[in-house]
Image (cartoon, rainbow, N blue to C red):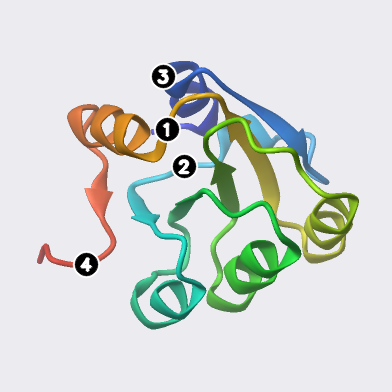
Amino acid sequence: MKLKQLLELVEGEIIISTDSNVEEIDIEKVAASDLMSDVLALSEPGSLLVTGLATPQCVRTAGVVGIPVVLIVRNREIMPETKKAAEMSGVVLCVTKKGMYEVCGLLYQAGLKPVYGQA
């Protein structure tokens, strides 16, 4: 699914992006966690990270494992340090007002797969 479609589905928006063609990023798998240790252990490059954390650590963690897009749920206020980390790492930073449970349900219904648990 293209990022543009994904954001329409979850009523999200892009906050930080360094790529003009960002809406064409293809997302097939999703990781959802507020525990960055789980993200480090279980995520796959090219997946989407859904999190309630609005700290620079979530962006840095995404960058380390090769996650191109972070979607912050629950309409959290994004710290300036988080925005700067996204700009520096090239990670696309998005937000939605929806909660994590609803976002994950919508993405699963739309056919996106979890990063682990499926062959």
38 vs 117, nearest the viewer: 38
Above or below, 63 against 77 in this view is below
Is 12 displayed left or right of 60 in the figure? left
Above or below, 74 against 72 in this view is above
Residue 72 x/y as whole percent: 57, 43
Quadrant (top left/top right/bottom left/bottom right) for the C terminus? bottom left
Quadrant (top left/top right/bottom left/bottom right) for the N terminus? top left
Above or below, 66 against 16 in this view is below
The span from disc 2 to disc 1 (Cα, nearest Å) is 22 Å
Tell me, for residue 9, which label it has, or none: 3
Q: Which mark sits nearer the N-terminus, 1 or 3?
A: 3
Tell me, for residue 116, which label it has, or none: 4
Q: Which mark sits nearer the N-terminus, 4 or 3?
A: 3
The span from disc 3 to disc 2 (Cα, nearest Å) is 14 Å
The span from disc 1 to disc 3 (Cα, nearest Å) is 13 Å
Q: Nearer the viewer, mark 4 or mark 2?
A: 4
70 vs 34, nearest the viewer: 34
Query: Callout 1 environment at 10 Å: few (<14), some (14 to 19), or many (20+)?
Result: some
Query: Mark 1 and 3 residues: CB-CB less than 8 Å, in contact?
Result: no
Which residue is at 23% across, 49% downward? 113
Tell me, for residue 26, which label it has, or none: 2
The span from disc 4 to disc 1 (Cα, nearest Å) is 21 Å
Which residue is at 42% across, 32% downward? 99
Residue 12 x/y as whole percent: 57, 24
